[in-house]
Amino acid sequence: MRLSAPRFWWRDKPGLLARLLQPLGFVYGRITARRMRQPGIEAGLPVICIGNFVAGGAGKTPTAIAVVRLLAERGEKPFVLMRGYGGRLSGPVEVDPDRHRAADVGDEPLLMARHARTVIARDRAAGARLARGLGASLVVMDDGLQNPALTRHLKLAVVDGASGAGNGLCLPAGPLRAPLAMQMDEADAVIVIGRGEAGERVAALARTQGKPVVAARLEPAEAAARRLAGAKVVALSGIGRPEKFAATLRETGASLVAEQVHGDHHAYGLADIAAVLATARGHGALIATTEKDWTKLAPLWPEEALGSLVVVPVTLAFAEPAAIADLLATVTPGRRA
């Protein structure tokens, strides 16, 4: 299980604890930046990397799903390549949602495989070879901006508008994986999801370096939003930024009466489910959870309690679809638009 990011990471200015950890962050950030500049192996097909500058959820997975959809509309056969964090299989293996479980391949790959053909591999080059052998015309790496294993022909950095680069320091003093300006050098474009001053500051840096900035927003599925509107809701999540999920629920018009928050990639047990069901009964409320969490909850959830559960898928919508299309066209020249 990956713990939730500490709150002090997301303050506009570093506090005392962050300053005490800053020397460690300086060393970590320089090592990562040096690693990012190493040359990668050519996969024999175009590779689009969708990563982020920080540790913690920024919206990479819904961005990858949206990009895969756009590539398919262009006549491509995209495969998603993921590490498979939290799964026991090292790969390379294609994820089969009818056969694999989150404990096998990780929760995010299991979610992704319901939207696109997905390969997990701790060895990214081996994973790309498998995807190519299975007929991929193009690989979309979900995460990997800091991983130099493969040559990446388009590197898109995803930024959460509300949190941006946090306090601007590197792990463990802050959320950055390497100094922001150094990472920006390696990115080809920035996608800012949602509004916020923190995200706009990152966007402003991107523009000063001549990087395209694409605005986007996360939209909950209409059916889930209709069911949540005006309802009392208990939020159940084990993701990097649970506050983003809570904000999404409030935007549907739901009344959030309680939250059961776990660390990112939490491995749910029956006790977790019993606790949230008891909380919901006490409030006379529905339970809302994410698609990612549902990949692990589904085998455990009691059938008689399904009526009180709302799974909330989200879709990424680009403010200017032509802008992302132009970026994708740089790695798919001459393809059908």
Image (cartoon, rainbow, N blue to C red):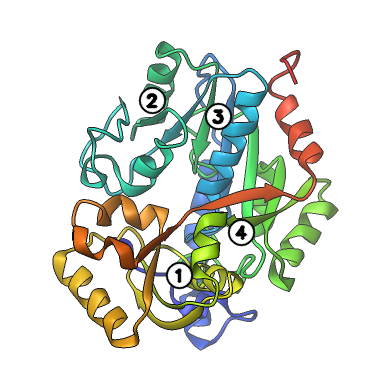
* Circles 2 and 3 in contact, beta carbons < 8 Å: no
Relative image position of residue 223 (x, y in whole percent)? 52, 56
Q: How crowded is mark 1: few (under 14 residues within 10 Å), some or many (20 or more)?
A: many
Q: Mark 2 points at which residue?
A: 127
Q: Mark 1 points at which residue?
A: 242
Relative image position of residue 215 (x, y in whole percent)? 74, 53
Identify the residue shown where x is 77% and y is 50%. 319
Relative image position of residue 115 (x, y in whole percent)? 46, 36
Could you tell me how far apart the alpha carbons at marks 2 and 3 are, in whole angstroms?
18 Å
- Going from N to C along the chain, the mark reached first, 1 or 3, is 3
* Amino acid type of the residue tagged 3 in the rendering: Pro
> Looking at the image, is mark 2 or mark 3 nearer the viewer?
2
Q: Looking at this view, is 26 or 326 the one in front?
A: 326
At mark 2, the secondary structure is: helix
Residue 39 marker: 3
Q: Name the residue under label 4.
A: 179
Identify the image quadrant of the C terminus: top right
Identify the image quadrant of the N terminus: bottom left
* Amino acid type of the residue tagged 1 in the rendering: Pro
- Going from N to C along the chain, the mark reached first, 1 or 2, is 2
Q: Is any atom of residue 33 visible in this view? A: no
Q: How crowded is mark 3: few (under 14 residues within 10 Å), some or many (20 or more)?
A: few
From the viewer's perspective, is 322 left or right of 59? right
